Image (cartoon, rainbow, N blue to C red):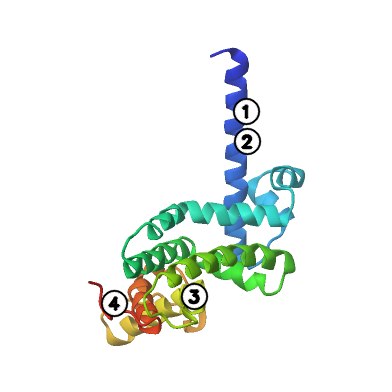
Amino acid sequence: MSPRSYRMGQRQAEVDETRARIVAAARAHLAETGGVSLDAVARRADVARATVYYQFGSKAGLLEAVCDALAAQGGMAGLAEAFTLADPWAAVDRFVEVMGGFWAVDRVCTRRLRALAALDEEVGRVIADRDARRREGAAVLAGRLPAAPPDAASLLFVLTAFETYDALAAETAETTETTGTGTGTRGPAGAPDGGGDLTVATPAVIRLVRAALGGPAERP
């Protein structure tokens, strides 16, 4: 390797490390404050504000990178498997499982991000674009189901939303705490702290999806 190639490789590694640090700072800032301040993110990542703009172009670009990081960590690449399974119900089950794993990566950050989308148009566009992709996938899988209801795609889209898993996971924590079968972690004023494992909701979502879309109650 020539000295020039080595320096270029080293420079790229430094750029990648800086990007990762900024994305991590943005996730932490979102989780703690429920907002996105480029100045605060820059301070947290120990970089200049101009560096954030240089790397991501805008707040929307930074949030896209945050979503990409969550998707990579959450195994969204496994979603492709759902579209290759021959059995249509197994494909839907896999879709539900992968979405559960994705939503579980950073429950608090995702909750804050989706809440902010309702208030901030720029954030809203980022989330709407991501949701549109899930809607398209749901339509493809619902279209393969035998004797599915006309609104099967819409039902699958709604039932695989973050809010569905989040609510069901909170109910599971509440139930285990009340019955004494487990320990539910509680935040201020008795509210769930959001730090629990969101994947506990996946079996319930699968049952809901199968019931709503006219599928068998149990997996074959």
Q: Which residue is mark 3?
A: 153
- In the image shown, does 89 or 203 lie closer to the viewer? 89
C-alpha span from label 3 to label 2:
41 Å
In this rendering, which labeled residue sits more in front, label 2 or label 4?
2
Q: Residue 6's x, y, as percent?
A: 57, 19
Q: Quadrant of residue 48?
A: top right
From the image, tell me which residue sits under label 2.
15
Relative to residue 65, is residue 203 drawn left or right?
left
- Mark 2 and 1 residues: CB-CB less than 8 Å, in contact? yes
In the picture of the structure, the residue carrying the numbered disc 4 is 182
- At label 1, which amino acid type do we have? Arg
**Based on the displayed image, in which of its 4 quarters is residue 96 positioned?**
bottom left
Residue identifier under label 1: 11
Residue 163 % position (x, y)? 51, 76
Task: Specify the amino acid type for callout 3.
Answer: Ala
Q: Is residue 150 above or below residue 101?
A: below
Q: Residues within 10 Å of mark 2 (few under 14, many from 20)?
A: few
Residue beneath the point at 54% across and 69% down: 135
Amino acid type at mark 4 = Gly
Question: Which of the two labelled residues, at mark 2 and mark 4, occupies the earlier sequence position?
Answer: 2
Secondary structure at badge 1 equals helix
Q: Position of residue 35 (x, y in %)?
A: 67, 65
